[in-house]
Amino acid sequence: MYGTFIIFSSIILILTWFTFNHLGKSPVEILSFLQTHKKFDLTMSNIFFPFKNNLLPILYYLAIIAYIEPSIMQVVYMSSSPSQARSVFLYAAFISYIIMGSILLIALFVFIKMPGLRGIEAWNYILASSSPNFRVLICLCLLAMAMSTADSKLHTSAILIVYDLLGSIRRTKMDAAKQILLTRITILVLSIFAMLLLICNRYSPRYDYIFRHISAFLVPSIRLYSVVVVAPFIVAVLGVRIRLPIVLMDMAIGLCTMYGWDKWIGPMVGPVSSTFVSIVANGLFMLTAHHVWPNQKDRQLPNDHPLA
């Protein structure tokens, strides 16, 4: 695992360095070019607030926490303690900034070299103007990123299905050997199903039409997932244990808030997602009901301190 990470990170850094050398300009020349180019504005307002409406930037960045993927939740509750989960996310965030910064630098160097390129033309230019060794590095980076993402998503999906879904349905607990075998079978089935979907979507217009409708259906379902799940998850990470009736009422409050915001408030403030507002209402109601509910005491997570 560590070897794969070192190789993957090294390839991205080498690719960035090769792109900088191929550019043939010093950092001073790069900055002067960006400051004078019309299509590139280095002002802080354009970097962090690329919106004309003053309300949209705030809601946009707040909405980043509105969707916490199941894979992130799985990392948290599979950790031995909250401090271990905090360390994992701290290291992952630091490494992610390095990788994303390297990718952005590659795109920036290509823009400086050929400012008129758009979209896929940039990739065509990179491949056409690079040496065979450079093309190999690009292919390795793309394959490594695709395989890493697919591997983590498949493992997370299999664990959620076997340990959480089937584990909660079965009354008797499966032994470790059966769980591992069933997890591997689930990964194999999900991989085959994903490849079949990709092939059908690529070569059949009929299936492409079906997949577009499936994607249109998944967008509102993701909003429902965020409103229902994210607030209880954050409260649990903070170390508060909420009773099941409060959680169920809290989920209903979040859904009602999302519906009311979209119907009455949304048209007045503009096309802003109500997901974040519903999550806030969800969490506030949950904490209020937790402290008002009789005979209910706050309990911390065992053997550790809550995340703060």
Image (tube, rainbow, N blue to C red):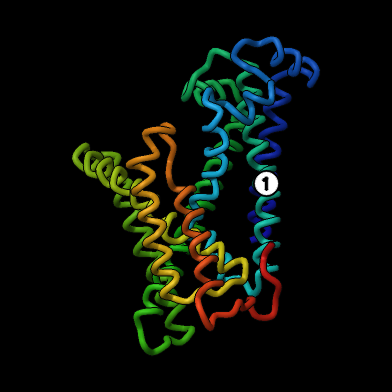
Number of numbered discs: 1
**Residue 186 or 297: which is nearer the viewer?**
297
For the residue pair 207 and 305, the one nearer the viewer reads as: 305
Q: Please tell me which residue lies in front, 43 or 194.
A: 43
Residue 108, given in percent of the width and then of the height, sits at 64, 25
Figure quadrant of residue 165: bottom left
Residue 300 in the image: above or below residue 111: below
Q: With 101 as the anchor, is 186 left or right in this view?
A: left
Q: Secondary structure at mark 1?
A: helix
**On screen, 40 above or below 49?**
above
Residue at numbered disc 1: 9
In the figure, is residue 32 to the left or right of 54? right
Q: Position of residue 36 (x, y in %)?
A: 70, 10
Q: Quadrant of residue 256?
A: bottom left
**Is 181 situated left or right of 102 in this image?**
left
Tell me which residue sits at (65%, 25%) in the image.
45
Name the image quarter holding the C terminus: bottom right
Residue 1's x, y, as percent?
63, 61
Q: Residues within 10 Å of mark 1 (few under 14, many from 20)?
A: some
Tag 1: amino acid: Ser
Above or below, comparing residue 294 to residue 290 in the picture: below
